[in-house]
Amino acid sequence: MNNIFVYCEIEDGKVADVSLELLTKGRVLADTLGCELEALAIGSKLDGIEKELAQYGADTIHIADAECLSPYRTLPHAAIICGIFKEEQPQIALFGASPVGRDLGPRVSSALHSGLTADCTSLEIGPHTDNKSGKVYENLLYQIRPAFGGNIIATIINPDCRPQMATVREGVMKKEVAKTPGKGVVKKVDHKKYTSDADFVVRIIEREMEERKINIKGAPVIIAGGYGMGCKENFALLHELAEVLGGEVGASRAAVDAGMADHARQIGQTGVTVRPKLYIACGISGQIQHTAGMDGSSMIISINTDPEAPINKIADYAIMGDVMEVVPKMIKYYKQN
Ligand code: FAD
C-alpha cells in the first residue's frame, strides 16, 4: 500500500526504455520514502518480463497478459490501471511521456481526480509547508518541468490528492540495473475484473507504424551542429564524421530553424534528450535550452571559434577553431586510425 507505481510500456514485445528509466528513478524515490516500487505491465506474451523489471528494482510486478490487451488500446488499459490503483492506493504513479503515456496518464488521473504534471524532466522528494494552513508535508513528490515557454523551471507539488502523478520525458533519466534487484513478486492480473465489453468496442483494424528514420536517442556518438555550421550543405561534413565514428548527427534549434537539419535531430528542451558516450558540439554556443538535452553525455567536446562560448564550461575538451577546418581534420584522422 502507498507504494510507487511505474506503468511499464511494452514496445514490440519489449519493455520501453522510458519505463526502465522510470523504474531506475522510482527505485531511488522508493528508497528515500522507505516504500516499495511496483511495476505494472499490460499486453500479451509477457512471459519472462518480470526478470527484467526486478533487475531494475521492481518489488512487485503486476502483469495483465492476454491476447486482447495487445496492441495498446486506451480504454482497457486505463480501466485496468484505474482498478489496480483504486485497490493499491499508490502515493506516486509514473508514466513515460511517450504517445502511450501521454494518452493514458491524463485519462487515469482524471478518473481518479488526482491531477498530473506532464512532461517532467526531473523528480525529487521534498517537504512543503502550506502558507495558509501551516500544515507541514514531509515527503512530497517535486514534479519538475520547464514552464512559461521554457523560460523558468517550475517545481509542481500535489499536496492532497493521491496518487501524485507525472509523465516524464523520454531519455532525461538514466536507465540502470539496480544495485540490489527488487523482490520481483509477480501478481497476475485478470483483466476481466476491471474491464467490460464496452472497453473493447474500439477495434484496431490496421496498425501502421511509421519507422523512425532518424533515431538519435540511443546513438553512442553524436556529432551535433549548430548555427555556426553556416548552412545545410556544411552539415554533410558532420554526417561524414558521424559515419566514421559510428554515430548520428544532432542539431541545435537554431540550426533546425535555419533549415540546416531535420527537426527529428533537434537536441534540447524542445527536442530530444540524449546521453551518448561522446558528444561533439560543432558551432553550438551552449544555451541552457540546448545543454538541458545533452549535459548527461559521458564526454563532451566543443568546437567553437569563441573561447567564451558557454558550451566550453561543460565541455571536457574545448577546441578553439573554425568547424570547417577542424572537422575535416578529424575525419581524416579517424579514417586513418
Ligand atoms: P548560436 O547561439 O547562434 O551559436 C552559434 C555558435 O557557433 C556560437 O557560439 C559561435 O561562436 C559559433 N560559431 C560561429 N561560427 C563558427 C565557426 N565557423 N566555427 C566554430 N564555431 C562557430 N535550442 C536548442 O538547441 N534546443 C532546444 O530544444 C531549444 N529549445 C528552446 C525552447 C525555448 C522555449 C527557447 C526560448 C529556446 C530554445 N532553444 C533551444 C534555443 C536556444 O535558446 C538557443 O537559441 C539555441 O540553442 C542556439 O543555437 P546555436 O548554439 O546553434 O546558435
Image (spheres, rainbow, N blue to C red):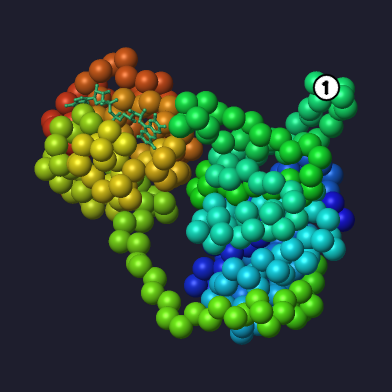
> Residue 272: x and y, percent?
42, 45
Q: Against 4, is 333 above or below?
A: above
Q: Position of residue 331 (x, y in %)?
A: 18, 43
**Point 79% across, 72% down: residue:** 187
In the image, is 80 to the left or to the right of 254?
right
Please tell me in which quadrant of the rendered image residue 222 appears: top left
Q: Which image quadrant shows ligand 1?
A: top left
Q: Quadrant of residue 10?
A: bottom right
Badge 1 element: loop
Q: Is residue 60 left or right of residue 334?
A: right
Disc count in the image? 1
User: Residue lying furthest top in this view?
Assistant: 308
Quadrant of the image containing the N terminus? bottom right
Q: Pinpoint residue 54: horizontal percent, then vertical percent.
A: 71, 62
- Residue drawn 45% across the image and 43% down it: 273
Q: Looking at the rendering, which quadrant does residue 76 occupy?
A: bottom right
The reply to whether residue 277 is visible in this rendering is no
The answer to whether one can see residue 99 in this image is yes
Residue shown at the point (52%, 68%) measured from the top left: 11
Amino acid bearing label 1? Lys
Q: Nearer the viewer, residue 310 or 321?
A: 310
Residue drawn at x 86%, y 27% is: 136
Which residue is tagged 1? 132
